[in-house]
Image (cartoon, rainbow, N blue to C red):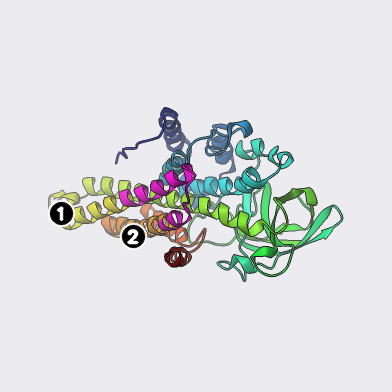
Amino acid sequence: MTVDRILPNEEGYELLDLVTELADRELAPRAADFESRGEFPREVLRTLGRSGLLGLPYPQEYGGAEQPYEVYLQALEILASRWLAVAEAVSVHTLSCYPTAEFGNEQQRKLLPDMIGGELLGAYCLSEPQGGSDAASLATRATRDGDHYLVTGTKAWITHATTADFYNVFCRTGGPGAAGVSCLLAASGTAGIAPQLPERTMGLRSSPVAQIVFDDARVPADRLIGEEGAGFRIAMSALDSGRLGIAACAVGLAQGALDYALAYAREREQFGRPIIDFQGLGFMLADMATQVSAARALTLSAARLRDAGRPYRIEAAKAKLFATDTAMRVTTDAVQVLGGAGYVADHPVERFFREAKVLQIVEGTNQIQRMVIARSFAR
């Protein structure tokens, strides 16, 4: 199904053509194999980085493409429609570059070309075993020791935990609550940092997610991003952008499921005619297409606010909430369109269905998004 797009510049159209070409050549043929083996496609990420697709929203002076966020999100959508794990990896990596790009000093920003170029893969270490949604209560502690910090604690549900080259580590340098949280940029080879075995997940099996144990890990003090006590503000600012990334991933996944279901319904015949001709199936597909378009419009509307420098936090929460709920509904219906065939791994909608669920959880559960939106009414 062709998606008609209106972009803010001509370069955006060329970029999306490049993304589509790479997605069709590098992602679509490999997705099922890598997912079945649970192998992370690190070289695919390097290819995307060398093609300039890991730095779309970042400044040209650091090797980025300096594109509007609405262009970046539509690139992410195209990737997700072919292979969600890769799109999510791009979203997480872009999120992991954000603290250094937005809050880092000039010395720290010298790392950005390798980050954006895909040579250094990032991870975002915020959640903990006892503190997921309540990020302000995180327990990982960093104690100043001369020109280093000694970091101790455990992070949980960290995408790229076992493959990342750098970690954004949100840790407690002060007292309780949000004001005591700081952000450190730690190299993966640092002594005392120990990624654990990957989790056995329902979907996104080619995406390595694991706990990371910090046992007096010595992180240089000059890797403090911003200042002590600024970590929670950095984390929340990054998540506003990250939620738009997950919304775009959800739109892409839903679009991929819709496209497959449409193709199947045109070819599959029952009672002497294609099943798409039956009103029950046709109406279901119509609802799926409408929901995908609505999710895309809401996501891009929030992106345009961000590009204009306007407040977008609430709109990002709405987009993440609606788009990920839409992905769950559309992938569920895609399985239904295929009937029994949709329940077996021979068709990708079975995988799409399993993958959609995690999007309602990551970057803040959808219950948290509802709380963010509801609290805005009181203000």
Query: Is residue 123 left or right of 253 when viewed as pictured?
Result: right
Instruction: Quarter of the image for the N terminus: give it.
Output: top left
Camera-nearest residue between 377 and 175:
377
Residue displayed at 31% across by 46% down? 259
Q: Earlier in the sequence, mark 1 or mark 2?
A: 1
Marks 1 and 2, how far apart at CA: 20 Å
Residue displayed at 74% across by 62% down? 173
Q: Position of residue 203 (x, y in %)?
A: 48, 58
Looking at the rendering, the stretch of residues picked out in magenta corresponds to 293-318
Disc nearest the viewer among 1 and 2: 2
Q: What residue is disc 2 on?
A: 329
Q: Is residue 305 magenta?
A: yes
Q: Position of residue 127 (x, y in %)?
A: 61, 63
- Residue 30 visible: no
Residue 2's label in the rendered image is none
Q: Is 184 rendered above or below residue 90?
A: below
Inspect the image, locate mark 2, and give the three-letter code of the amino acid beneath it: Arg
Q: Position of residue 250 (x, y in %)?
A: 41, 52
Q: Is 301 rendered above or below residue 144?
A: above
